[in-house]
């Protein structure tokens, strides 16, 4: 078998842990498998680098930011390779550039365009274990880029796809994907498997196990992904194509996201082209808008538009919105960041009815007010006041019987 094994920041946080990673990798290789390793920076390292940059500039150049941030993964890839060699196995570390991970030019959240990978294939053929620095690529013009926070997951999935690995294993500090955050609900159950679509919703909703874009990529190219712990040998959670038994339960998981800010534009003229103008401006700045709600005001002349953006982009989004508001002669802009988004997710929602109603009822029974609602075929999300986040997660997990319906599965 050909396997890509990705180790997150906590799994390479210390020299001791890097040695443990090397042992796992060498063990896999000795079982006769071909192994490519992808590593994150040591836990906290990327944050540290960001802090350094901000001590120098409040608005550091994004090109230099990428050069800076990519260094964290260089460190761990080299150290991991050394640790493998210490165990008597041949290893070679490569940066994103050396692998030929070609991206677009959107610094700090670049998209992968293609992967050359010939040096990796050659090294594998020569019997090396290959260790790749995650999170980074290079533009056609040879500038270093990074793939967004948590981007090593994407590096791993993309490499697995490009090199036709049999599967991509994501090693992290939890046993797999849970029905919700076990820190909030200790009875949360580990899922044996989950569909790409559900995982995508959960990832984008702030269940931090996998980076959203890595799941999109895995779904598109049907890369089987296994999420498991680097601290034990439990089987983990398989992220794969949807099958019939996944549809039996209406709700597979409850997710929350405290990293959202709501921006409201009041008194926007009610005519064609306004929303287009507003959201084009925000999209051009590569800011991802999540929920959007528009209401026609009671006077019939103007509308209110509310939308949510990640907290990290809120300043930028607010500034852009204020500029556009002036141009559109709207009444004003307000920002609210004491909010959280709570979501229930499940492919079974396609065939079960009354799921949304039950969610609203459950929140109402506990006096939790709903500020915004959005739905998709397999998800219902509500924006609520942030202080109710834990309560909402607990009561919804309970209301949908998530602690009972699934088997604990292997753990
Ligand atoms: N080191 C990067 C981050 O902290 C990428 C990763 O860990 O996946 O976001
Ligand atoms: Mg991660």
Image: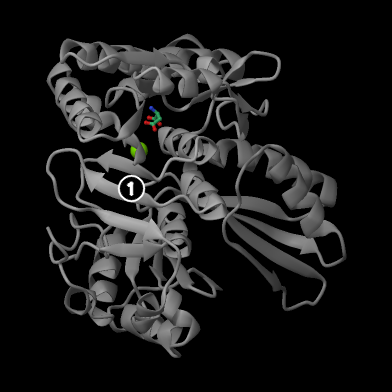
Residue depicted at x 25% and y 30%: 29
Q: Is mark 1 on a helix, strand or loop?
A: loop
At x 42% / y 32%, what residue is drawn? Answer: 152
Residue displayed at 34% across by 78% down = 363
Tell me what residue is drawn at x 16 percent, y 26 percent: 23
Relative height, residue 211 to residue 29 (above, below): below
> Cβ(mark 1) to ligand 2 < 8 Å?
yes
Q: Is residue 331 above or below residue 113?
A: below
Left or right side of 107 for 45? left
Is residue 386 visible to us here?
A: no
Q: Is residue 374 left or right of residue 266?
A: left
Vertical relation: 381 (above or below) 28: below
On the image, the x and y values in percent for residue 397 come to 25, 73
> Can you say whether 385 is above or below 380 in the image?
above
Residue 208: percent from the left, percent from the top?
Answer: 35, 47
Residue 210 or residue 313, whichever sits in front:
210
The quadrant of the rendered image in which ligand 1 is seen is top left
Q: In this view, does 271 lie to the left or right of 231?
A: right
| Rendering coords of residue 168 (x, y %) | 38, 43
- Image quadrant holding the C terminus, namely bottom left
Disc 1 crowd, CA 10 A, few/some/many (<14, 14-19, 20+):
many
| Residue where numbered disc 1 is placed | 209
Q: Which of 288 and 84 is in front in this view?
A: 84
Task: Name, please, the residue furthest toward the right.
Answer: 272
């Amino acid at each position: 078998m050909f396997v890509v094994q990705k180790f997150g920041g906590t799994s390479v946080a210390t020299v001791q842990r890097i040695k443990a990673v090397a042992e796992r990798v060498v063990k896999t290789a000795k079982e006769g498998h071909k192994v490519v390793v992808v590593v994150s920076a040591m836990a906290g390292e990327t944050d540290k680098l960001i802090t350094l940059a901000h001590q120098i500039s409040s608005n550091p150049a994004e090109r230099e930011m990428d050069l800076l941030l990519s260094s964290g993964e260089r460190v761990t890839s080299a150290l991991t390779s050394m640790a493998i060699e210490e165990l008597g196995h041949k290893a070679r570390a490569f940066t994103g550039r050396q692998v030929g991970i070609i991206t677009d030019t959107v610094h700090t959240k670049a998209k992968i365009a293609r992967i050359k990978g010939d040096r990796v294939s050659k090294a594998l053929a020569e019997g090396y274990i290959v260790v790749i620095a995650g999170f980074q690529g290079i533009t056609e013009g040879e500038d270093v880029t990074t793939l967004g926070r948590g981007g090593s997951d994407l590096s791993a999935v993309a490499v697995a796809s490009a090199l036709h690995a049999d599967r991509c294993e994501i090693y992290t500090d939890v046993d797999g994907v849970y029905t919700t955050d076990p820190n909030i609900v200790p009875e949360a159950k580990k899922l044996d498997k989950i569909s790409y679509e559900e995982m995508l919703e959960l990832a984008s909703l702030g269940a931090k196990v996998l980076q959203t874009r890595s799941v999109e990529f895995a779904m598109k190219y049907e890369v089987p992904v296994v999420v498991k712990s680097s601290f034990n040998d439990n089987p983990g959670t398989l992220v794969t194509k949807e099958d019939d038994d996944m549809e039996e339960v209406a709700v597979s998981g409850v997710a929350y996201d405290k990293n959202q800010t709501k921006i409201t534009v009041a008194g926007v003229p009610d005519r064609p082209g306004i929303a287009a103008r507003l959201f084009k401006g925000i999209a051009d700045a590569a800011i991802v808008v999540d929920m959007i709600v528009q209401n026609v005001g009671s006077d019939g002349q103007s509308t209110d538009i509310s939308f949510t953006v990640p907290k990290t982009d809120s300043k930028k989004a607010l500034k852009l919105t204020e500029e556009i508001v002036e141009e559109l002669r709207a009444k004003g802009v307000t920002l609210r960041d004491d909010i959280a988004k709570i979501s229930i997710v499940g492919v079974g929602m396609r065939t079960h009815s009354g799921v949304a109603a039950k969610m609203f009822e459950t929140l109402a029974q506990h006096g939790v007010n709903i500020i915004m609602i959005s739905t998709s075929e397999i998800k219902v999300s509500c924006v609520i006041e942030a202080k109710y986040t834990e309560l909402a997660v607990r009561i919804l997990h309970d209301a949908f019987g998530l602690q009972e319906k699934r088997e604990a599965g292997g753990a």
